[in-house]
Amino acid sequence: MEQLKQALTSAPVLILPDPERDYVIEADASHQAVGAVLMQDLGNGLQPIAYLKKELHRAGLNYPIHDKEALAIIITFKTWRCYLEGRKTTVYTDHCSLEYLKTQPTLSRQQVWWIDFLETHFHYGIVYKPGHRNKADALSRPAHVAAIQIEGMNPLLKGLFTHGYTIDPEISLAEKRHLLQWDSDIVYRKGSTKIWVPNYPPLCQLLLEEYHDVLYRGHFGSNKTLAGMAKHYYLAHLANDVQKFITSCDTCQRMKSSKQKKAGLLQPLPVPEQPWQVVSLDFITRLPPTTSGHDAILVVIDKFSKMGHFIPTHTTSRTKETAQLFVCDIISQHGIPTTLISDRDPKFTSKFWKELMSLLGTKLAMSSAYHPQTDGQTERLNQIVEQLLRAAYKDEISKWDLHLPVLEFAYNKILMSLLDRPTWKIHNAFHVQLLKPYRDPNTVFTGRRPSPPPPVLVSDETENGIETVLPHRRRRNGIVELLIRWKGYDPSEDSWVPESDMGNARRPLR
């Protein structure tokens, strides 16, 4: 009785290891875990230095019992390697066949690797010791306390489980893969004591209320609630349900303080005061190469009027070529912008481009990394251009660069129609000094007329422009003739032309 009192009132104390003495290990394994005790004899018998308990996962659960017992020894030597290297170690195990591990007639690759690891780094010996005398036996059998004892389960709760198993399609799939085991009409994860929770909303809600809403659960967040449930249940589908359940909890919403930083103020780009004051540009690349060698488009858009320009170019074009396109197609028509918005393309971050814009007095505003929303307007226009190309010229992919001016006109025309103003309306971005007054030649020299415009080349044939069509006539032979006034010519030059000779003009005339 006195010894029992002493054992109950004084816990064993771990000792510090003596590096000059030999070590003793007692190791054991069960189906789910391994355990071990590291000991030394300092003159008062074997005393513990450290305890080890480790649960098996994945492949370890599928090992045969012989390999699980060997795995317990390997894990022990890996964990306490800092103590065991260079000293003699005696390992006690309750699996007698491990005494002959090195002399087995056949070895698996895993066993060969284990033996090589032990022989290379340690001086050890394996000795058989019955399980009831092995201190590590208890460590290898961790207690799994179920949240609900099946023997005393509420009949209503058990009915929810059994009904959920009948309607959950995942159960049949898991059975085919041999992942489940049945016990008293309750499904467990194979090789575990965790109960498989079916995808049945009434049951899931009941369990969530038990693990979150009751007083002693503390109304914790989703991670802690899910971790508490995962100790006793296999939750293949409950992660989203837990998140939704907790975010909709009335108590949590009323009582918990917010842990998130308040959203900052938006920082939109300032609205320009006039057209072509702020310009953004970007490239559309990886297009089918054309016969002219173009495989990219430089897209330029005005932030004020939304007017755009589509300039064909090359993916391999250098910064100087891009600058030349920008000067010839944009600055020559609209003047020098005050701000230029772009992404961080190497062409726009080069020293040449920065010095050129500095000389022009243009401020560069580049988007931050991985944030294309900075230049979202140009990105949206890129989508429109790609859609127009795919829809209009899918059969002439090698000549899409020839049709870009038409697409540009179509885009600007429909855009200005939406804005209720024509595309060609003069705006204040066009400097007045570039305008010159028109002087009619007839006002200076009577009878002087401007030279007629050159003919237009259509289908390899020259055609003159028509200003208007005067009344027509029908001859006796039935041929219809039209009186044409030619563009740029005097009325004296009007002529009768058979309708059949009008060619490309016949359709619009009708």
Image (cartoon, rainbow, N blue to C red):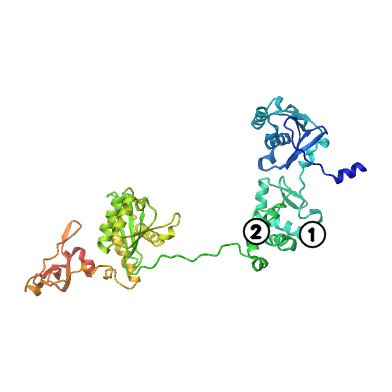
Q: Nearer the viewer, mark 1 or mark 2?
A: 2
Residue that extends furthest to the right in the rendered view of this protein: 1
Residue 51 position (above or below residue 437): above
Number of residues whose C-alpha sits closer than 10 Å to that of mark 1, classed few (under 14), some (14–19) or many (20 or more):
few
Q: Which residue is painted at 23% across and 67% down in the image?
A: 507
Of the image marks 1 and 2, the number of the one nearer the N terminus: 1
Number of numbered discs overlaid on the protein picture: 2
Amino acid found under the numbered disc labelled 1: Asn
Residue 200 position (above or below residue 35): below
Q: Quadrant of the N terminus?
A: top right
Amino acid found under the numbered disc labelled 2: Ser
> Is residue 395 at least partly visible in the picture?
no
C-alpha span from label 1 to label 2: 26 Å
Instruction: Name the residue beneath numbered marker 2.
Output: 222
Instruction: Name the residue beneath numbered marker 1.
Output: 154
Residue 303 position in % (x across, y down): 36, 65
Residue that extends furthest to the left in the rendered view of this protein: 446
Secondary structure of the residue carrying tag 2 is helix
Q: Which residue is painted at 65% across and 28% down in the image?
A: 120
> Is residue 435 at least partly visible in the picture?
yes
Which of the 4 image quadrants contains residue 493? Answer: bottom left
Residue 509 position in % (x across, y down): 21, 69
Secondary structure of the residue carrying tag 1 is loop
Q: Which residue is painted at 27% across and 54% down in the image?
A: 324
Residue 125 position in % (x across, y down): 74, 28
Which of the 4 image quadrants contains residue 104? Answer: top right
Residue 155 position in % (x across, y down): 79, 59
